[in-house]
Image: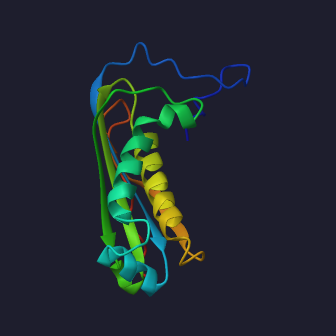
Amino acid sequence: MSSLTHFDAQGQAHMVDVAAKPATHRVAVATGRIEMQAETLALIESGTAKKGDVLGIARIAGIQAAKKTSDLIPLCHPLALTRVAVDFGTGEGGVPQVVCTATVETVGPTGVEMEALTAVQVALLTIYDMCKAVDRGMTINGVHVLEKHGGKSGSYTAAPPAKG
């Protein structure tokens, strides 16, 4: 395992210098899910939640979050994102849930994994916020990077989940 890059030789936190790194096309895909009561999922799917279009608002929140990642995570570089897509699936695996997948792209000297993860987390938190009046027991789970491409370290694809 390589050393942590956000610490200098004296052990002090610092922003990584990416000035000498070439700009390359970079892509990251992250996912996560929010589990809920079946009745809550039915409200979301029917579009009858009291606060409105839950998934539409969560999509916009995720996109905004990706763009603001460097404002939230202290050592992230501000990036010029070229694409942010936030998508949802529901009820997968027999569990009442919404699965969120975010794809983020840029052309630059550093990757976009943090932006994809932030988009997923904020989109899922937005679903919680919009539905908490009817289901405070919702849980956010399994947020992780599915894949990333570009840069010196090349590509990464998460291992498929173990069959139970």
Question: Would residue 3 appear left or right of 77 to someone viewing this image?
Answer: right
Q: In the picture, residue 52 is in which quadrant?
A: bottom left
Indicate whether 32 appears above or below 103: below
Q: Residue 162 at what x, y percent from top left?
A: 43, 74
Q: Quadrant of the C terminus?
A: bottom left
Res 134 seen here: yes
Q: Residue at x 32, y 73 (%)?
A: 47
The x and y percentages for residue 115 are: 42, 41
Q: How is the image coloured?
A: rainbow
Q: Is residue 22 left or right of residue 35?
A: left
Residue found at the far front of this picture: 50
Instruction: Identify whether 97 is placed above or below 150.
Output: below
- Residue depicted at x 47% and y 58%: 126
Residue at 35% in and 79% down: 91
Quadrant of the image for the N terminus? top right
Foreground residue among 132 and 82:
132
Q: Is residue 21 left or right of residue 128?
A: left
- Would residue 1 appear left or right of 104 to someone viewing this image? right
Looking at the picture, tell me which residue is in the foreground, 35 or 1. 35
Query: Is 55 or 113 nearer to us in this picture?
Result: 55
* Picture coordinates of residue 38, whole percent (x, y): 43, 86
